Image (cartoon, grey):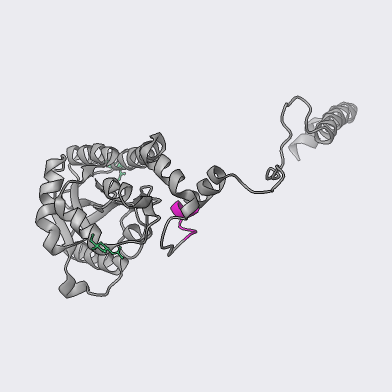
Amino acid sequence: MFFTKVVSDSKKSEVNMKFFSVLIVAVFLVALPCHGSEYQVFPLQMKTGSNEQYSTQVSCTSWRLGVEANNLIKWKTVPAACQEYVADYLLGDQYRSDSKTVCREAYFYAKRLNITAKDVFVFDIDDTTLSNLQYFANHGFGVEAHNATAFKIWVSFGEAFALPETLVLYNKLVSLGIKVVFITERPVDLKDVTISNLKEVGFHTWEKLIARDPAIYSGKLSNAFKTSERKKLVAEGYRIVGNIGDQWSDIVGEKKGFRTFKLPNPLYYD
Ligand SMILES: *[C@@H]1O[C@H](CO)[C@@H](O)[C@H](O)[C@H]1NC(C)=O
Ligand SMILES: *[C@@H]1O[C@H](CO)[C@@H](O)[C@H](O)[C@H]1NC(C)=O
């Protein structure tokens, strides 16, 4: 080896001495993990307190992380103990900040693309583009069992507000020349009110708005409907460069898009 060739025998012992002093210091540091640090680190901090229970704040944060990571699936309602936590999350700064992180990342990604006339970005509508927070605030923040009739009545009012971070992303994508396609679980008979609601709150242009046609998709899961509609888009020659939704069913499956973006939603699981 080059090293042994150039180092003479006399220098070798010098090198060995240096090596050993480094080794001794290293052993010393390993033996004293707190040396030079105020913190003693364990892989997972042990639970403390007499009852060995996590606080509601801590366990509901874990629940929400489990939901967002798609580890907790097919849940029907928000745990009753987490109602206040979910309300605080949605009405406070964290929901907005989490949404902003997702939307900014989607924009940074899109900005680097070489856009063609056939490039589309798929947007879900409910709790991705339009917020149903007003409805859920009046219905127990996800703790009450879902009532499809009451929800449809709310949607038919056309009074949902825009999710502000999504609106920012939408405007930036439109200025980049990327076409927007909305694919929504809302039934076709609510398409007109959805269009007026979208326009009212700042979404003025899109390539397509695809609502669920019960004649074709009766009894089909949301993901089957959305996947089928995305495949149609690709068959028509579109390139789905991105896809954003608040439900995992929006962003998994065939032709899901080159990149997908999951917005937070601790209110319901589709
Ligand atoms: C965009 O096009 C330029 C010029 O043709 C190329 O250098 C670049 O790699 C392309 N970027 C992407 C993300 O495809
Ligand atoms: C669902 O909502 C409708 C309309 O508000 C109401 O008439 C009905 O009683 C509700 N169903 C349940 C199970 O709460």
Of residue 127 and residue 256, the one placed in the foreground of this image is 127
Question: Residue 64: where, in percent of width, then height?
Answer: 47, 50
Q: Is residue 249 above or below residue 33?
A: below
Of residue 34 and residue 184, the one placed in the foreground of this image is 184
Quarter of the image where the C terminus is located: bottom left
Of residue 51 and residue 64, the one placed in the foreground of this image is 51
Query: Is 267 left, or right, of 218 in this rendering?
Result: right
Judge whether residue 227 can be spotted in this image.
yes
Identity of the residue drawn at 18% across and 71% down: 214
Q: Is residue 31 above or below residue 78?
A: above
Question: Residue 68: where, in percent of width, then height?
Answer: 44, 52
Residue 110 falls in which quadrant of the image?
Answer: top left
Query: Is 7 left, or right, of 100 in this rendering?
Result: right
Magenta-highlighted residues: 66-72
Question: Residue 107: where, in percent of width, then height?
Answer: 30, 39
Identity of the residue drawn at 41% across and 63% down: 76
Query: Is 262 left, or right, of 11 in this rendering?
Result: left
Question: Residue 97: where, in percent of width, then height?
Answer: 39, 36
Identity of the residue drawn at 38% across and 59% down: 269
Residue 17 falls in which quadrant of the image?
Answer: top right
Judge whether residue 184 can be spotted in this image.
no
The quadrant of the rendered image in which ligand 2 is seen is bottom left
Identity of the residue drawn at 68% across and 42% down: 45
Of residue 191 and residue 144, the one placed in the foreground of this image is 144
Does 81 lie within the magenta span?
Answer: no
Q: Tally the marks.
A: 0
Quarter of the image where the N terminus is located: top right
